[in-house]
Image (tube, rainbow, N blue to C red):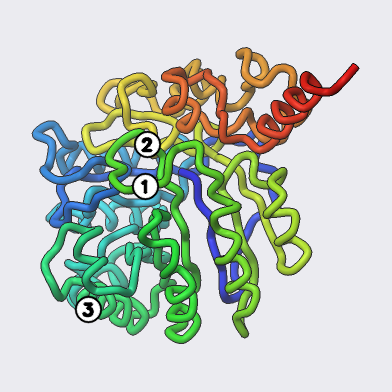
């Protein structure tokens, strides 16, 4: 997932190099494909539940095996995770072994009763609500919902704060949502939401209305960077884009505000589990070509340590990726999901990489130079 996080208030960030060797630390778990929304952009292509989704007992078994493998934190998403009637039971099982969770939701099912149960029976650290826009009509169009659902999401954010949870919101970057991101930042500042996360969609699943895969998303976001820096309260910008540190827009931004580049942890300290138990390195690679095992049959730690695709994510230059680029040891060979979309190969070239684009531009300029 290619993310830019705008963090308004001082909190936690990591200075650990994301390319350093690491044990398995975290899972990203889409617990169901069921969703009561029909978003135009969805990383899971959610809608109806799959008939082979993990049962309650299988989910609890996964929690215990993940804990034994060293996982101490799980990001929960979907679909809409609260469509699972047993979600609190699963989260309580996590709490029993000391595992924390962060939950991404559309907010429509977050009643005071559910939030009370989250507070009392689980170790939920934060909730992220997908907003995308503050325009009610556009919200309905983007989410495939009826009028009034934006007000419901904003009400959910109020309740999340009232129950004392770390509160964040997200927006999927599209030509339609771009102009409204400054308004979301203003609202976040006024309401005390800690972070606004901008997801830059990867075209592996449902991406209606998104920018093209090779769009220069960081240049597109420069007006948003300007607005963020002008806010009375702004702490840092955190990127989860492998090559972001080499982009001119980020170099300019770093002169004005603290910028932390977290790169891509897929296959490096995190695995993703889909609702039917298939394991992949990346949440945006819920495709058969990227499956490295299934929790019903395979040991999750063995998959992490030995699956060839995870090995390729950790050491791309040993698998023919960007072998002629001196930055590969620090950028990880770019985004494998982007490469898959652009080339049809998991070991293909991420053509959105600014280092590669500059090198190609220089080569073309040189080939046209007069002798």
Q: In this view, does 203 lie above or below 365?
A: below
Residue 221 location, quadrant: bottom right
Q: Where is residue 114 drawn, in percent x and y?
A: 20, 70
The mark lying in front, picked from 2 and 3, is 2
**Badge 1: few (under 14), some or many (20 or more) residues near its Cα, within 10 Å?**
many
In the picture, measured across the screen, residue 141 lies left or right of residue 342, that is left
Q: What element carries label 3?
A: helix
Question: Is residue 20 among what the camera can see?
Answer: no
Residue picked out by circle 2: 203
Residue 330 location, quadrant: top right
Distance in Å between CA atoms under marks 1 and 2: 8 Å
Task: Mark 1 and mark 2 in contact? Answer it, CB < 8 Å.
Answer: yes
**Residue 151, disc:** 3
Residue picked out by circle 1: 210
Q: Where is residue 53 drawn, in percent x and y?
A: 16, 36
Q: Where is residue 113 drawn, in percent x and y?
A: 17, 75
Residue 166 location, quadrant: bottom left
228, 12: nearer the viewer: 228
């Amino acid at each position: 997932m290619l993310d830019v996080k705008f963090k308004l208030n001082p909190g936690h960030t990591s200075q650990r190099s994301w390319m350093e060797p690491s044990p398995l630390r975290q899972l990203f778990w889409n617990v169901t494909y069921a969703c009561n929304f029909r978003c135009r952009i969805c990383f899971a292509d959610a809608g109806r539940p799959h008939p082979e989704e993990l049962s309650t007992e299988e989910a609890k078994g996964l929690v215990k095996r993940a804990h034994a493998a060293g996982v101490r934190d799980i990001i929960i998403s979907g679909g809409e995770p609260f469509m699972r009637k047993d979600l609190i039971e699963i989260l309580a099982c996590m709490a029993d072994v000391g595992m924390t969770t962060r939950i991404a939701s559309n907010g429509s099912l977050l009643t005071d009763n559910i939030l009370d149960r989250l507070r009392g029976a689980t170790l939920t650290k934060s909730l992220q609500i997908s907003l995308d826009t503050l325009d009610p009509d556009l919200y309905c169009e983007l989410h495939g919902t009826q009028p009034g659902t934006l007000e419901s999401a904003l009400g959910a954010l109020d309740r999340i704060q009232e129950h004392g949870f770390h509160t964040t919101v997200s927006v999927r970057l599209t030509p339609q949502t771009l102009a409204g991101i400054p308004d979301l930042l203003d609202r976040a500042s006024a309401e005390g939401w800690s972070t606004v996360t901008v997801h830059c969609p990867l075209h592996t699943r449902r991406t209606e209305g998104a920018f093209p895969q090779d769009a220069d998303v960081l240049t597109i976001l420069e007006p948003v960077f300007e607005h963020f820096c002008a806010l009375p309260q702004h702490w840092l910008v955190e990127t989860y884009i492998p090559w972001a540190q080499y982009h001119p827009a980020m170099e300019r931004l770093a002169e004005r505000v603290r910028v932390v580049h977290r790169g891509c942890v897929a296959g490096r300290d995190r695995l993703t589990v889909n609702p039917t138990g298939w394991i992949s390195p990346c949440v945006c690679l819920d495709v058969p070509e990227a499956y490295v095992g299934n929790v019903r049959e395979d040991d999750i730690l063995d998959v992490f340590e030995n699956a060839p695709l995870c090995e390729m994510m950790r050491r791309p230059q040993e698998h023919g990726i960007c072998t002629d680029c001196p930055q590969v040891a620090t950028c990880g060979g770019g985004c494998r999901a982007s490469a898959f979309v652009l080339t049809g190969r998991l070991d293909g070239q991420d053509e959105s990489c600014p280092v590669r684009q500059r090198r190609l531009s220089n080569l073309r300029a040189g080939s046209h130079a007069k002798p």
